């Protein structure tokens, strides 16, 4: 035992369970174990005398350390007073059974390591002093072996009760069937769904609403509002469908179907499908039939004034108009989402972002009849990555500035995208007569396949039956980068940058561009109008940007001033 160091094991109780060792107790154990052999004969003689004189064992003196004091209980049973340095002066009484006390808060200090339990206190009747000696030797020997084997890890791995901060919190599960949903695809489940939502939103614990795989829930237009008292998850593992007849919206807001608003910490997931049943809406569209009146149609899923939320692992198909819209939202993550509709479906944008910031779109596929992603007024800090787009109208910023409005979009990054068979690739579009700013936009690592207008900035955008009037004011566009954009163009003009006479585009960068004809024949070309910037690396078709210094010189000569210079 000479090799046992005081510092080898000096555990103090942490949390609500574990091993308690008192430093002075360890020293006493080690010293006693070292002297046991020398005093064994004397102790045996004393023990024989005690048996001869009294005829029975007498209570042995307990081994006392700094943190443990002998006490006497009313029934004479052995007990220990817990050291105040180990968490207070509360007293617990234990029968000396040799068993480890159950883990309570705080636990018994009478815990021994390596499966050996020793009760320091009054000796049990019928036990010999030698047995206590052997236990003392075993504990001390075990400590020495632990020190020599450097086995702190085995002690640290002993089970410990979890603290309140790490204990898993319970989650309440609400099955829509329990609220009366039939899930057969033709019975109206709107009320059942609303009741489930109300219950979940009022719950003080994290709650999950489940639409199971074998359910197809028919829902009429519904508002799913907050704020809710705790985190809420809507798990759509089955299918949610809309009424296929537009007349179901009679007297209701024709722009809404599933409308989430005023929510925080919401997750929508589950691997299931939301089906807008939009075919009849498309047939009635004025874009399909110009004799039809132009009327609004619902967005399948709208999130309004929501924050700190996630939409993941979800399929959204055949929306009446836009599929998923985020308006006035903050800190949203969209991942593993698929949005699908026919290429001929009108105005069926995949993901639409307005007046929002802190939006992340990743690992998403969008194949629709309009923009895969559209980013409009007063949005910023948006990241789009690992996206597959097409068919459709590409990834668009805008349109902006319609009806002489002031709008701003900035700090947008699109990185790693595959765009195929679309009417546009990466696009910025603004109306004449508007005002505002588009700035700090990066399109990087874009692969094009048979895309018309792969790179396009259009400050003369006009989406109306009648020609748009020429107007002098325009939304300013600056600090736009197209980096490593490669693939094939279905149009001869692979690069088109058409900017306003009164507000030219500035600081445009073209870097490492290679856009070949889709049919492998002929060549592609660039078109620029009032576009200033620079190029680097290989750029094909050849760039047509004017040098920014020329713009500055012209501005000074003409007396043009700009708030953004």
Image (cartoon, rainbow, N blue to C red):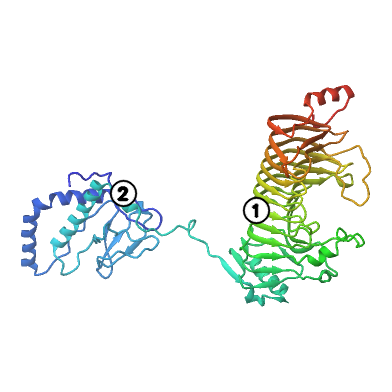
492 and 362: which is toward the camera: 492
**Residue at the spot of label 1:** 364
Q: Secondary structure at mark 1?
A: strand
Q: Quadrant of the C terminus?
A: top right
Q: Residues within 10 Å of mark 1 (few under 14, many from 20)?
A: many
Residue 38: percent from left, percent from top: 8, 50
| Residue at point 25%, 44% (across, down) | 6
Q: Quadrant of residue 448?
A: top right
Task: Residue 319: tell me if it is visible.
Answer: yes
Of residues 301 and 244, the one nearer the viewer is: 244
Residue 145's place in the image compared with 184, above or below, is above
Image location of residue 504, percent across then percent down: 83, 33
- Disc 2 is placed on an element classified as helix
Give the left or right position of residue 387, taking residue 528 as reference: left
> Which residue is more in the foreground, 268 or 163?
268
Q: Position of residue 27 (x, y in %)?
A: 23, 48
**Left or right relative to 272: residue 496:** right
User: How far apart are the two marked residues, 2 and 1, measured between alpha carbons?
Assistant: 48 Å
Q: Which residue is outermost to the front? A: 521
Of badges 2 and 1, the one in the foreground is 1
529 sits left or right of 191 in the view? right
For image coordinates 9% across by 57% down, the residue present is 43
Residue at 25 percent of width and 48 percent of height:
149
Q: Residues within 10 Å of mark 2 (few under 14, many from 20)?
A: few
Count of picture labels = 2
Circle 2 residue: 152
Give the residue displayed 86% in from the left and 36% down from the top: 500
């Amino acid at each position: 035992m000479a090799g046992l160091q005081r510092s080898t094991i000096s555990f103090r109780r942490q949390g609500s369970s574990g091993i308690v060792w008192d430093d002075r107790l360890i020293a006493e154990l080690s010293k006693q174990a070292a002297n046991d052999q020398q005093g064994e004969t004397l102790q045996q003689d004393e023990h024989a005398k005690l048996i001869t004189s009294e005829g029975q064992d007498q209570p042995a003196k307990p081994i006392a350390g700094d943190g443990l004091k002998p006490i006497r209980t009313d029934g004479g049973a052995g007990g220990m007073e817990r050291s105040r340095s180990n968490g207070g002066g509360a007293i617990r009484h234990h029968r000396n059974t040799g068993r480890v006390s159950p883990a309570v808060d705080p636990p018994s200090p009478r815990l021994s390591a390596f499966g050996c339990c020793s009760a320091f206190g009054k000796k049990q009747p019928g036990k010999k002093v030698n047995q206590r000696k052997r236990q003392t030797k075993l504990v001390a020997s075990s400590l020495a072996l632990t020190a020599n084997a450097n086995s702190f890890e085995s002690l640290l791995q002993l089970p410990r009760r979890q603290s309140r901060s790490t204990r898993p919190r319970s989650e309440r599960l609400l099955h829509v069937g329990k609220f009366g949903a039939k899930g057969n695809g033709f019975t109206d489940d709107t009320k059942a769904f609303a009741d489930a939502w109300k219950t979940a939103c009022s719950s003080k614990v994290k709650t999950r609403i489940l639409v199971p795989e074998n359910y197809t829930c028919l829902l009429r237009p519904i508002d799913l509002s907050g704020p809710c008292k705790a985190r809420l998850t809507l798990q759509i593992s089955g299918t949610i469908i809309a009424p296929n007849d537009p007349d179901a919206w009679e007297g209701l807001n024709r722009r809404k179907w599933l409308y989430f608003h005023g929510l925080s910490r919401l997750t929508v997931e589950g691997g299931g499908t939301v089906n807008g049943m939009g075919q009849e809406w498309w047939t009635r569209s004025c874009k399909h039939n110009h004799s039809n009146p132009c009327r609004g149609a619902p967005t399948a899923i709208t999130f309004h004034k929501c924050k700190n939320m996630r939409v993941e692992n979800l399929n959204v198909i055949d929306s009446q108009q836009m599929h998923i819209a985020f308006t006035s939202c903050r800190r949203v993550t969209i991942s593993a989402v698929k949005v699908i509709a026919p290429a001929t479906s009108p105005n069926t944008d995949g993901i639409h972002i307005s007046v929002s910031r802190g939006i992340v779109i990743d690992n998403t596929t969008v194949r629709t009849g309009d923009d895969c992603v559209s980013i409009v007024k007063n949005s910023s800090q948006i990241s789009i990555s690992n996206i597959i787009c097409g068919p459709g109208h590409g990834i668009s910023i805008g349109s902006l500035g319609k009806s002489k409005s002031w709008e701003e979009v900035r700090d947008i990054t699109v990185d790693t995208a595959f765009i195929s068979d679309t009417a546009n690739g990466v696009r910025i579009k603004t109306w004449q007569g508007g005002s505002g700013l588009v700035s700090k936009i990066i399109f990087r690592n874009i692969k094009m396949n048979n895309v018309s207008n792969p790179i396009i900035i259009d400050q003369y955008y006009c989406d109306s039956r009648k020609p748009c009037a020429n107007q002098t004011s325009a939304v300013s566009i600056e600090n736009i980068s197209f980096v490593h954009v490669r693939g094939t163009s279905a149009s001869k003009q692979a690069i088109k940058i058409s900017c306003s006479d009164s507000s030219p585009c500035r600081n445009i960068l073209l870097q490492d561009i290679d856009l070949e004809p889709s049919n492998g024949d002929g060549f592609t070309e660039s078109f620029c109008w009032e576009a200033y910037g620079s190029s680097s690396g290989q750029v094909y078709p050849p760039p047509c940007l004017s040098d920014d210094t020329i713009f500055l010189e012209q501005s000074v000569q003409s007396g043009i001033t700009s708030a953004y210079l």
